[in-house]
Image (tube, helix red, strand yellow):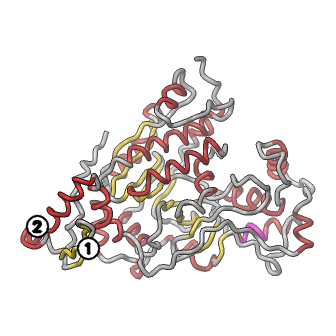
């Protein structure tokens, strides 16, 4: 197991060059000059020591660290957008057509139709069929490597959606900003200041979720070690094993036993809740949770620092790779995830923003995020944890890098899906 020591003061005053930070002490803001490490003891130690003693008495050490460091990882001039659910505004004629189940023309659409007509929301209002088939025939079929405009054009050719030249179904508003494949090739113009990139590793704890018996971690481990990225492994959750559900429930990772065909989906959600709980203990302002089939770019921290320099300062979660993203592009690399307001009434669990490949969290707000996500998964029965987070993006400031940006920050290795394999496994004999 690789352990990150989580030194509390690492990154606090380590940036070269003079910068001004603010420490909250006894309710007042105290300016503290950020100098090279050799000069820190002469300038700031007294101020920090006083503030730290006060924070220790109030139990707020982590808040103190967060206030000093976490505000560095965003763009203070970036506007914060409304997080309200949004839907398409089609003409009356197309709204009528989209409310009627279309003629099934392909096996993919036939499978999608059966799923939608017999799934957990089948008793609710009929879905927006134009949108459902635009997702299934377009984005899902291309594994997220097509734009929403291309997806709509494909479904229009099948007669199931409006002509995009007349009525656009922009799942990502302002797509010209971030729904661009070439933006995944970071240029010199995208680079964050070198001091910021250098400081980022010390401000972040990294966790890799992995089932010990899967054997999938070794290639990721080798890549992370080659990049000198330290991490902690977090055990995955295998609900196909006898006694695993009881153990996970005792750990408050699940609240419902999985039905046949859901063991992998439930186990995936439980594993991410375990990783989030572990990350909440970090004394660093940022936490990155990765799955064990992720291959980071060679300049991972430099590119991530560039993305953070674009991020609005309200962000609580950033997905480093999101398939079929829904919301609004806000910068060259980021979209603001928004709840999908199309289709079924009273059913927000829509298949958008796939993938929990690499999720970046603010540690100070992670407990809030985890608790809201837990309710969405187990109480609202949105069992796919990635889709569940998108469904509550009006409660959580959630941003994502569209997967169409290649090569991007991370690459998903083709190991196959453990979640799907576990879903096909027989239930355990308790």
Residue 145 in the image: x percent, y percent?
Answer: 63, 63
Q: Is residue 288 placed above or below 97 in the rendered structure? A: above
Q: Position of residue 155 (x, y in %)?
A: 81, 65
Q: Residue at x 69, y 54 (%)?
A: 351
Identify the residue at image location x=47%, y=37%: 236
Rendered residue at 32%/59% (across/down) = 63
Residue situated in front as seen by the camera: 72 or 66: 66
Label 2 secondary element:
helix
Instruction: Name which quarter of the figure residue 164 lies in.
Output: bottom right
**Majority secondary structure of magenta residues:** helix
Q: Which residue is mark 1?
A: 29
- In the image, farthest residue toward the left: 42
* Range drawn in magenta: 149-153
Horizontal side of residue 82 vs 206, given as left or right: right
For label 2, the residue is 46
User: In x, y percent, where is residue 220?
Assistant: 41, 48
């Amino acid at each position: 197991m690789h352990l990150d020591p989580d030194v509390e003061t690492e990154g606090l005053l380590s940036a070269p060059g003079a910068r001004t930070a603010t420490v909250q002490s006894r309710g007042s803001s105290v300016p503290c000059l950020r100098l090279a490490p050799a000069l820190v003891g002469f300038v700031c130690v007294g101020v920090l020591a006083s503030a730290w003693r006060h924070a220790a008495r109030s139990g707020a050490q982590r808040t103190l660290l967060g206030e000093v460091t976490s505000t560095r990882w965003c763009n203070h001039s970036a506007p914060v957008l409304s997080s309200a659910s949004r839907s398409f505004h089609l003409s009356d004629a197309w709204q009528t057509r989209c409310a009627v189940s279309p003629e099934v023309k392909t096996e993919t659409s036939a499978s999608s139709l059966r799923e939608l007509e017999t799934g957990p929301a089948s008793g609710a209002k009929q879905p927006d069929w134009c949108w459902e088939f635009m997702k299934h025939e377009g984005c899902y079929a291309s594994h997220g490597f097509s734009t929403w405009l291309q997806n709509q054009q494909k479904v229009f050719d099948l007669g199931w959606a409006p002509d995009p030249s007349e009525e656009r179904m922009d799942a990502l508003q302002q797509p010209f900003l971030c729904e661009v494949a070439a933006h995944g090739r970071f240029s010199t113009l995208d680079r964050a200041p070198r001091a910021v990139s250098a400081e980022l590793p010390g401000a972040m704890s990294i966790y890799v979720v992995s089932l010990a018996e899967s054997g999938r971690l070794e290639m990721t481990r080798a890549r992370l070690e080659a990049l000198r990225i330290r991490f902690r492994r977090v055990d995955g959750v295998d609900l196909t094993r006898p006694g695993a559900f009881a153990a996970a429930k005792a750990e408050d990772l699940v609240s419902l036993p999985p039905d046949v065909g859901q063991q992998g989906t439930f186990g995936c959600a439980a594993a991410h809740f375990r990783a989030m709980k572990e990350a909440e203990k970090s004394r660093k302002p940022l936490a990155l949770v990765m799955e064990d089939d992720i291959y980071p770019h060679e300049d991972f921290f430099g590119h991530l620092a560039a993305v953070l320099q674009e991020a609005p300062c309200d962000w609580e979660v950033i997905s480093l790779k999101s398939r079929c993203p829904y919301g609004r592009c806000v910068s060259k690399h980021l979209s603001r995830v928004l709840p999908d307001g199309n289709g079924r009434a009273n059913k927000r669990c829509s298949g958008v923003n796939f993938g929990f490949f690499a999720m970046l969290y603010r540690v100070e707000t992670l407990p809030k995020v985890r608790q809201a996500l837990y309710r969405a998964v187990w109480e609202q029965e949105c069992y796919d944890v990635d889709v569940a987070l998108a469904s509550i993006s009006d409660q959580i400031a959630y941003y994502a890098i569209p997967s169409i940006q290649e090569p991007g920050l991370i690459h998903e290795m083709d190991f196959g899906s453990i979640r799907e394999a576990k879903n096909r496994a027989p239930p355990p004999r308790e």
